[in-house]
Image (tube, rainbow, N blue to C red):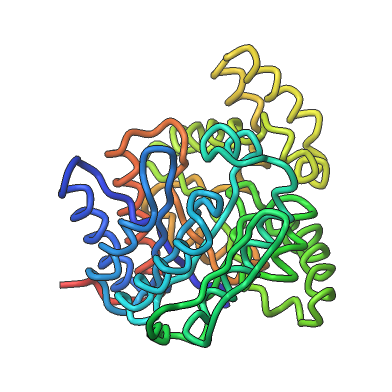
Amino acid sequence: MTTFGVNAFGVGSGRQRFETMTELAREAEAAGCTAVWTSELYSRSATVPMAVLAAGTETVSIGTNIAYGVGRTPLMWAAEARDLDELSGGRVILGLGNGTPKMMEAWHGVTGEAPAARMAELLTVLKKLWRLHEGPVDHDGRFYSIHIAPTADVPQPVRPEIPIWIAGVNKLMLRVAGEHADGLVGHPMFTAEYVRGPVAEEIAVGAARSGRDPSEVTIMGIRMCAIDEDVEQARRQAAFAIGQYAASRVYDRLFELHGWSAAQQVIRQAARDRDTEALIAGVTDEMIDTIAIACRPSEFAGELGRLPGGFDHLDLIAPPWGLSDEQTMQINRHILTGLREHLGAAQPA
């Protein structure tokens, strides 16, 4: 059975942004969501909002979708994760990604070489540091060198292990997820066919390396939801977002799997030409209906009931491109209304 989550999106500035994201998270909790998600970029962290959400909710899991694995040292990741898990009472999911090699180099000042190998090593080190209360940690690897012997007692963490999910699209990172991670944070472009095909195949390869069952890896999808009384406007919003991703070569294998490679070339040329209308027109109805949900608010709950299988958890988001904060928040509220109906949860007082 697929579980659902939403992004804990906040609007406004100062304290108001945190208050609105907490309010949304509480509504998601009441609606029956199993998780709320927050992310980070060059101007925002993920861990500070996680602390706010942990203090403001009771039962819902709080995850990062995603935080940059290279953005903190392994030691600080483990320390912050311990604090967050303690604050939340054991509700944190640590979702990590590297970003592109260019982002690793230009934003974080680390080499962009071998991102999958770096992620595998990071997970290995984090698991050692999570057990720091058991004794010293020594690690000398390709990317990380850590030697720490606690000088005082280290409190035992809330949970023996913290779930770590990693972002991955292509072969090597998917194999790392299968071998080392507790879950895979999919991408908004992931289709059920791509998950049941290439994703499942590569996770199985990685899982075999560590001698575990591939089903132990939770598969999370991210479904873009464009919801508007004007259905054509909703479809344009979805098409614009899909077009932004389609221009990248990262998703070539997905487009090839669905027979969309020719259309992808049209979209890619429109992106080069900065021709927004051509880009939107290049995204076919089949792409929109396979990758996203585009509908009226009254239709959304029904659309959730027709989603294909393949995902253990779905994070339902507004299209991440081209919307104002107010439009994004409105869509999030439509998502929660539809989820409440779909899951049969009572309207909060």
In the image as oriented, which residue stretches furthest toward the top? 273
**Which of the pair 187/43 is nearer the observer?**
43
Is residue 313 placed above or below 271 in the rendered structure?
below
Q: Nearer the viewer, residue 108 or 163?
A: 108
Q: Position of residue 6 (x, y in %)?
A: 41, 59
Percent of width and height locating residue 263: 75, 29
Is 98 rendered above or below residue 152? above
Expressed as whole percent of the image width and height from the top left, the position of residue 70 reads 55, 50
User: Measured from the top left, where is residue 28 in percent x and y?
Assistant: 32, 66
| Residue sitting at x 32%, y 72% | 29
77 relative to 246 in the view: left or right? left
Q: Residue at x 45, y 78 (%)?
A: 150
Res. 153 image quadrant: bottom left
* Residue at image point 25% right, 62% down: 52
Identify the residue at image location x=39%, y=54%. Answer: 46
Quarter of the picture containing the N terminus is bottom right
Q: Is residue 345 above or below residue 15?
A: below
Q: How many marks?
A: 0
Q: Name the one closer to the observer, 284 or 43.
A: 43
Q: Residue 247's image quarter?
A: top right
Q: Residue furthest front?
A: 151
Image quadrant occupied by the C terminus: bottom left
Specify whether 10 is left or right of 199.
Answer: left
